Image (cartoon, grey):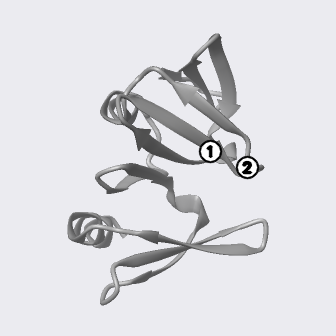
């Protein structure tokens, strides 16, 4: 996967590649040795690349590994509950809760 100057990312999927704008990618979820790519519009793609490989390839600061199985586009992050270890994201005026790790909270707080 590569990012380019026009903020498009090339993601390998089952039948070839899909090209998405970075801001359209909501999250990447581990599915065994595969990765489920979820967009803001709720489209889903499966990549034969594992989560770690995709994460290393992302060249944008918007994506954080929030737990062992999820990379999140933090542009949609609205709040973090340190006590319950939950992040709230807002996508198309719909709130969702995602479990987060202590490591994410510490790394994210250092960055911001």
Would you place residue 23 above or below residue 66 in this image? Answer: above
Quadrant showing the C terminus: bottom left
**How far apart are the alpha carbons under marks 1 and 2?**
6 Å
- For image coordinates 41% across by 23% down, the residue present is 49
| Number of numbered discs visible in the structure rendering | 2
- Figure quadrant of residue 16: top right
Mark 1, secondary structure of its residue: strand
Viewer-closest of 79 and 36: 36
Where is residue 54 shown, x and y percent of the image? 40, 30
Contact between marks 1 and 2 (CB within 8 A): the answer is yes
Would you place residue 51 above or below residue 48 in this image? Answer: below
Name the outermost residue toward the front.
32
Where is residue 1 shown, x and y percent of the image? 48, 20
- For image coordinates 35% across by 28% down, the residue present is 33
- For image coordinates 67% across by 21% down, the residue present is 18
Would you place residue 42 above or below residue 22 in this image? Answer: below
Viewer-closest of 45 and 40: 45
Q: Is residue 86 left or right of residue 101?
A: right
Q: Is residue 22 left or right of residue 92?
A: left
Q: Which residue is mark 2?
A: 42
Name the outermost residue toward the top.
16
Q: Which residue is mark 1?
A: 38
- For image coordinates 49% across by 21% down, the residue present is 2
Where is residue 20 shown, x and y percent of the image? 68, 31
Mark 2, secondary structure of its residue: loop
Viewer-closest of 108 and 83: 83
Would you place residue 45 above or below residue 112 in this image? Answer: above
């Amino acid at each position: 996967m590569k990012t380019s100057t026009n903020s498009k990312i090339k993601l390998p999927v089952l039948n070839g590649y899909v090209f998405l704008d970075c801001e359209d990618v909501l999250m990447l979820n581990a599915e065994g040795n595969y990765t489920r790519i979820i967009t803001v519009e709720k489209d889903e793609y499966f990549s034969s690349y594992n989560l770690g490989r995709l994460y290393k390839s992302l060249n944008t600061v918007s994506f954080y590994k929030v737990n062992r199985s999820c990379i999140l586009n933090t542009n949609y992050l609205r709040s973090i509950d340190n006590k319950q270890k939950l992040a709230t994201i807002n996508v198309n005026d719909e709130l969702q809760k995602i479990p987060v790790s202590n490591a994410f909270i510490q790394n994210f707080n250092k960055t911001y």
